[in-house]
Amino acid sequence: MKIIIGLFFLHIIKTIQIEDIVDTTLMLRSTITLDCKYSGNETVIQIYWTKFNGSFEEAICTIHQNFGKYISQNYMGRMSFAVKNLSSDLSITLRETSEADIGIYFCYLTLFPTGTMKKVIAVQADDFGHIIPSSHQTLKENSSIILNFLYTLLGDVNKVTVQRFANGKIDFVAHCEHSMNGGKLTYGFDFMKRSFVNCLDLKNITLIIHQAAITDEGLYQCHFCSDDKNQTIAVNVHLQTIGITAISTFALLCGVSLLVIIVIFTIATWCLIRTRKNKRIQAKQVNVSFNSTYPQIKIDTLDEEHTYANFVPNF
């Protein structure tokens, strides 16, 4: 099995051309997590991670549905999977990192029946800097995030790039471009399944993210590129868990109300039983007072003997 896996990695180590668009950019830390999560319905057959080293891809690890998992010797002991088996979360974590870990990483997913998908992740040493948002929006969790970015400068816009800044990383959302050959729209790996960007007018961009989760909050930035000037607009999006809080509050109120009802019902039942018991005791006492037998004096009139005496008064 190791021979098969080794031949497989020799097949993927090849000269490549780096794409201009990177799905996620991370800052180098002592421990970094390379996110690769798939939200589709297809079956994940295999996942493998590589790192671009100048002219070829260095194998890091792989998980196969039938052959199991494999970790390269260079990453043994400081790399771990988010989950042990194939699932929707295919992320890996690198510990004890150094400047040698700066570079471009690839997450390849082999899906059935669609084929292979790829996510590009860049690790850099420089900070992203401080970004001041133009506005703030507070939305509810599981609702749709709808953001509108309007270009206010003069000139024609050629291309637009939307990104999200959160938790020390940059996620590529979408890229719109108009050229002589027509328009082009590209979505980031984590946004292709549930996002929509209207690119008909590059001066007026609308971004919609359906069923937003807490992990979708952050600073959304739209960068307009024109022939003369560029403009960047940033919106800070905060998501509230009002739905969950409301449900919890409702459940708590229902529980308290039910407890109060049970207590009242128990007290009322006890009082009713007590009242009925007292009435039965009083009724028994009354019956005893009326039904009690007392000793009767027998007067025998048939056998009674009468005694007569002659009494002579003494004058």
Image: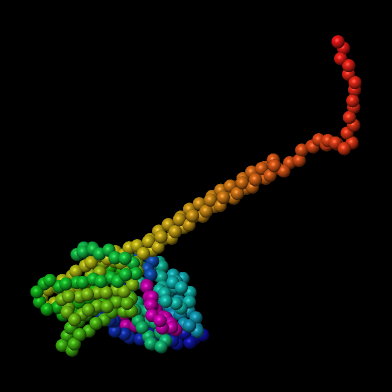
Pick the front one: 259 or 271: 271
Q: Residue at x 16, y 72 (%)?
A: 150
| Colouring method of the image | rainbow
Above or below, comparing residue 130 to residue 59 in the picture: above
Q: Position of residue 176 (x, y in %)?
A: 21, 80
Q: Position of residue 37 (x, y in %)?
A: 38, 75
Residue 167, picture quadrant: bottom left
Q: Residue at x 48, y 57 (%)?
A: 258
Picture mark count: 0
Quadrant of the image for the C terminus? top right
Pick the front one: 43 or 266: 266
Q: Is residue 37 magenta?
A: yes
Q: What segment is highlighted magenta in the picture?
A: 34-58
Q: Residue at x 29, y 81 (%)?
A: 18
Residue 63, picture quadrant: bottom left
Q: Residue at x 79, y 37 (%)?
A: 295
**Which residue is farthest left?**
154
Q: Is residue 52 visible?
A: no
Q: Is residue 273 left or right of residue 311?
A: left
Pick the front one: 307 or 128: 307
Q: Is residue 291 visible?
A: yes
Q: Position of residue 274 (x, y in %)?
A: 59, 47
**Which residue is farthest top?**
315
Q: Is residue 223 left or right of residue 59?
A: left
Above or below, comparing residue 174 to residue 275 in the picture: below
Q: Is residue 220 magenta?
A: no
Q: Position of residue 298 (x, y in %)?
A: 83, 36
Q: Is residue 32 left or right of residue 278?
A: left
Residue 95, picture quadrant: bottom left
